[in-house]
Image (spheres, rainbow, N blue to C red):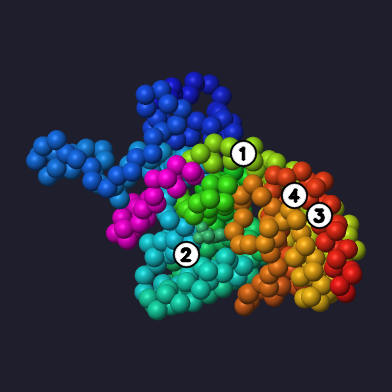
Amino acid sequence: MQKPPRSGAPLKPETRLVAAGRAYSEHGMVNPAVYRASTILYPTVEALTERRQQYTYGRRGTPSSRAIEDAVAELEGGFRAKMLPSGLAAATSVLLAFLKPGDQLLMVDTVYHPVREFCDGMLKRLGVETVYYAPGIGGNISGMIGEHTRMVYCESPGSQTMEVQDVPAIAAAAKAKGVLTAIDNTWSAGHFFKPFAAGCDISIQAATKYIVGHSDAMLGAVTVSEEHWPAYRHAYEQMGLFAGPDDNFLALRGLHTLAVRLDRHQQNALAVAAWLRDRPEVEAVLYPALPGAAGHDLWKRDFTGASGLFSVTLRPASDRAVAAMLDGLALFGMGFSWGGFESLVVPFRPHRTVAPFPHAGPALRFHIGLEHPGDLIADLDAGFARLKAAA
Ligand SMILES: *Cc1c(COP(=O)(O)O)cnc(C)c1O
């Protein structure tokens, strides 16, 4: 067991991340053990009949799952958390836990696309109506809240096009009408944006991204306020959800270095984004942390930092020229997901229905990793030369 924190000034987030979840370690080990468990034994018939012990069955929690759940709740500033097998499962479990036939869901138009598919498919089949709203709506969400609206779902910034939402205004408008606010907080990793302080009731993360941080596990996290915890926990247990102990261990291991990794992702991303902004091939850099970029003021008001994920749009170029640029990159992998130590790039076309994307040229999403930014810039510089040669 770890010593309790000394009394006095509240500990800073970095300090808390180092300590988080370690109350479950034993025998003087720095880290809690990985408990691989299905059956948990009871000493007597009476103890079994009354389930009179802390751990009762593998799916219902072990020291390994409790450690990361406590740590994530601490990171997000919420009451309690549960871990799930993927970020998508985290998002869909929240929708299934709180919505019922006849309810309406207000969903941000820039939501992670597989969540949109779930809303338009399974939720629709279950009799839940999804109405999409523009990410910049702010407090005007109030005008869309009707008799059957049960939840407003945010994702800020949107993980492709990077619109920052006025989450405090949305959450206040929702609360005034007795409506829940849920947010996909993956971009900030819970370190740079505190959703419960902003008025949200539920925070969702693809822990696959920055919490795990090394591109070697899939995991989701749901953190809930005290008021709504019993309802979420009940649904989570009814659905039989549970994340495996080894993945939970990797998440806790990643979480201890989250603050220092994010600071470096931010520093590198700012260097690469500023260089891209000055390139003649680039039309717009969509990175709220960059002064002058869309959403910068809102980001500065509500976030304490930025992660390494941003997008750019290029001036018109053929698909062939863009492919020539990307195919030859040595340090940027091409693939989905992000949040690991390595740099990535993917071309994308945003799918949305109410808020048209105002850029016509090719769009690229970058994840800036922990490489030296000078090396990344040199790689991109050679890429732009290939783009030009292929034009
Ligand atoms: C990746 C991602 C998810 C889904 O997470 P998985 O672990 O891949 O299922 C959800 N939301 C956002 C913003 C993401 O980037």
Q: Amino acid at mark 2?
A: Met
Q: In this rendering, is residue 21 above or below 135? A: above
Is label 1 in contact with label 3 (beta carbons under 8 Å)? no
Q: Which residues are magenta?
A: 225-251
Return the disc, 1 or 3, that comes first in the chain's sequence: 1
Q: Is mark 2 within 8 Å of ligand 1?
A: no
Mark nearer the viewer, 1 or 3: 3
Q: Which residue is mark 2?
A: 151
Which residue is painted at 51% across and 68% down in the image?
Answer: 115
Q: Nearer the viewer, residue 349 or 358?
A: 349
State whether the magenta stretch is mostly helix, strand or loop: helix
Q: What residue does disc 4 label?
A: 269
Element assignment for label 1? helix
Q: Quadrant of residue 3?
A: top left
Pair 3/4: label in front = 3
| Furthest residue toward left | 45
* Spatial CA span between label 3 and label 2: 44 Å
Residue 140 placed where, x, y %?
A: 61, 66
Q: Mark 4: which secondary structure?
A: helix
- Kind of residue sitting beneath label 1: Ala
- Which is nearer the N-term, disc 1 or disc 2? 2
Q: Is residue 307 above or below residue 146?
A: above
Q: Which mark is residue 379?
A: 3
Dot 3 or dot 4, earlier in sequence: 4
User: So how many labels did they put on this image?
Assistant: 4
In the picture, the quarter occupied by the C terminus is bottom right
Q: Nearer the viewer, residue 212 or 97?
A: 212
Mark 2 secondary-structure assignment? strand
Q: Is residue 304 visible?
A: no
The residue drawn where x is 77% and y is 43% is 372
Label 3 sits on what residue type?
A: Asp
